[in-house]
Image: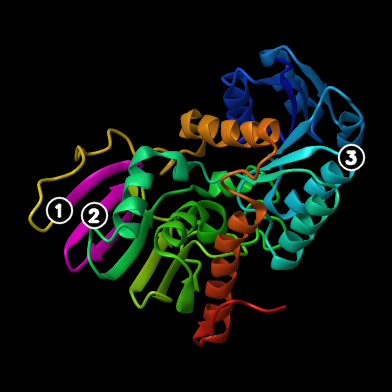
Amino acid sequence: MEKIGVGIVGCGAIGPTHARAVMEIEEAKLVAVCDAREERARRLAEQLGVEWYTDYEKMLEREDIQVVSICTPSGTHADMGILAAKAGKHIICEKPLDVTLEKCDALIRVAKENKVKLGGIFQHRFAEESRLVKRLVEEGNLGKIVLANVDMKWYRSQAYYDSDAWRGTWALDGGGCLMNQGVHFVDLLLWIMGPVEWVRAETTTLTHNIEVEDTAVAILKFKNGALGAIEATTSAYPGVYARISVGGYKGSVVWEDDKITFLKIEGKEEEAKVEKPAIAWGASDPMAIPAGLHTRNIYDIIRAIIEDREPLITGEEARKAVELILAIYKSAQRDEKVFLPLTY
């Protein structure tokens, strides 16, 4: 079988993770990498034994590349994806899809117009423990859900934000602890619980010299009637955990860093091995995020291309977390309850 050729644009923190994931997939072949910084592109290419570019559009001319993995700053994702789509390349887009709904929708539209696949990266959906939580809720095992919360106590130093000029900016990061780090868990919450009716939020910047928030709290009402909350920070030294808890009238479950740490259902024994995570991946070090779940996520997109089907995380799916985070920002800025869906 001919392998699907992959090019990666963006060789910073997450680009090498995508590269390792692609190289684990039998049906895919990493062909080239690209970065505006020559030293980054050359270093990663030499490590992997592939070609490198600083000119993205030049890389897109290669006929042996069928899909492009976008790992550039968040506010450039749609621009990079649109160029790829117009070149006839399928798209793997790292979170978030982009930082505005206008840009997200433009990318989704252009991908459809050019008949290419657009797959989003939210790798935690591919953990068995995450799927268990979703199944418990969907099948009614927890009874009527009353509360569902995200609690992310992570840490990023000022040096992290200073390491690249785009970090901590509205234009290219699109936000702070929510849009960059918390977007993973906002996505999981929406995937498990379904859409949100309204949000009431407060955001602030407490410990970093950045434009955007490093601490946020939001109250939610889901369309299924349950209430919820999102707490997120990148100021909790040394970086503790990311946790999602779901409480229902017949049972409750707690997910923490891709492990189930609590599960109890009325009248039943525990249905999963409950364990404490050995490490809180990514809580303090963005370079500590393992590639395993990325491999599953990217594999699904590669199989979607081969099988001519939609990936499990489409552009429309990846857009949902962006919309809720933007609603949180709007609520905090206006000091008012904000209803979804957002309009623009």
Q: Quadrant of the N terminus?
A: top right
Magenta stretch: residue 153 in it? no
Q: Earlier in the sequence, mark 1 or mark 2?
A: 2
**Marks 3 and 2, Cα distance to the nearest angstrom?**
45 Å
- Evaluate if marks 1 and 2 touch, with contact meaning CB atoms under 8 Å apart: yes
Q: Residue 339 or 13: which is nearer the viewer?
A: 339
Q: Position of residue 236 (x, y in %)?
A: 37, 54
Q: Residue 88 or 289: which is nearer the viewer?
A: 88
Magenta segment, prevailing SS (helix, strand or loop): strand
Q: Earlier in the sequence, mark 3 or mark 2?
A: 3
Numbered circle sitting on residue 297: none
**Marks 1 and 2, Cα distance to the nearest angstrom?**
7 Å
Residue drawn at the location 53% of the way across and 82% of the way down: 339
> Which residue is the site of mark 1?
264
Amino acid on which disc 3 is placed: Ala
267 versus 278 height, above or below? below
> Which residue is the site of mark 3?
87
- Is label 1 in a helix, a strand or a loop? strand
Amino acid on which disc 2 is placed: Val
- Is label 2 in a helix, a strand or a loop? strand
